[in-house]
Image (cartoon, helix red, strand yellow):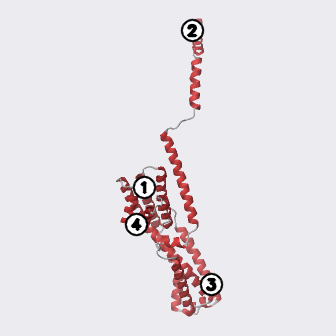
Amino acid sequence: MMFALAAMLVVLLAGGAIMAFSSGNGSAVAQKRVAALTRPVVRGAKTDGAATRKRNMQTAIKDFEKKQAEKKAVITLRRRLDQAGLGATSTKMFWIASASLAGLTLMFCLIRHQSLLVMALAAVGTGLGLPRWILSFLKNRRERKFTDDFASAIDVIVRSVKSGLPTNDALRIVSAEFRDPVGSEFKRLVESMKMGVTLEQALKKMFENMPTAEVSFFAIVMTIQLKTGGNLAEALGNLASVLRDRKRLQGKIKAMSSEAKASAMIIGSLPPGVAGIVYLTAPAYISVLFTQRLGNLMLAGCVMWMGLGIFVMKKMMNFKH
């Protein structure tokens, strides 16, 4: 028992001596480790380049979105005509056509001996509302045609860039090979660059003429690649895939909401349809709505409530994607 206790004490003394003699070296090692941890990290060139590119990308996106939001605030009549594809039509001709529609409506109401309220409402509706609705219809139709061909146009740019052509030549091929409105918009883009306009400014002008999310994505990608560099073909290829996915989702939403849209169209067309049939079969019965003041107020209330109902149904059927 005494022998075992003595052996344990000898082992403990030996361990303490070893730790005492090696404490200086251990302290030096510990100090080296603390200095290594507290030393400022020096990033490599590759890391700094990636971080700088990311910061430039975020800055470019924020600047582009801010400028586009400022331009969306005020939309002039000239820009509406350009967006509708009526660039050759001047604003003066538009107002002359609107005034002519209003004058024809007033003459028709005078022939039918309508009241002043009906005449005023009809003149305002045909002189201001109808032309603007036509512009909106033409603009939406033109944007749909542009979106249908835009992904294919980006694919042409990607293949041209991969084959070694410069970006300007790739844009020129799209302007020559695609139909309107894709061809005409890219033609404006190429012609603007020929006149000395930068690519960024030309893309902003393109977005003004075609204010769609797809053109906004394209402008952001091209602007970022212009400022930060990178693989343009890969970025545009990813954009084309995203645009096709958006189009596929849009078609799915349209198919799912087709029943609701058909019901809304039937319900919305019943009141004016029935009123038209009654006016043709028994005009004296329904003429009170147009000749009496109370009938005019009732007719105005019906138009207001029907418009509100159609607006609510349209908002319920539209999905953001």
Residue most toward the front? Answer: 196
Q: Closer to the camera: disc 4 or disc 2? A: 4
Inter-mark Cα distance, 4 to 2: 96 Å
Q: Residue at point 57% right, 34% down?
A: 40
Residue 298, labelled with which disc?
Answer: 3
Q: Residues within 10 Å of mark 4 (few under 14, many from 20)?
A: many
The residue that mark 4 highlights is 183
- Tag 3 near tag 1, CB within 8 Å: no
* 71 or 256, nearer to the observer: 71
Which corner quadrant of the image does residue 20 belong to? top right
- Rounded to the nearest angstrom, the CA distance separating label 4 from label 1 is 18 Å
Q: Earlier in the sequence, mark 2 or mark 1?
A: 2
Real-space Cα separation, disc 2 to disc 3, in angstroms: 114 Å
What residue do we see at 59% from left, 25% from top? 31
Neighbor class of circle 2 (other Cα within 10 Å; few <14, some 14-19, many 20+) is few
Q: Quadrant of residue 275?
A: bottom right
Q: Element at badge 1?
A: helix
Q: Choose the circle earlier in sequence order: 4 or 3.
A: 4
* Mark positioned earlier in the residue sequence (3 or 1): 1
Mark in front: 4 vs 1: 4
Q: Amino acid at mark 4?
A: Gly
* Mark 1, residue position: 236
Q: Residue at x 39, y 62 (%)?
A: 172
Residue drawn at x 55%, y 52% is: 59
- Residue 178: image x %, image y %? 37, 66
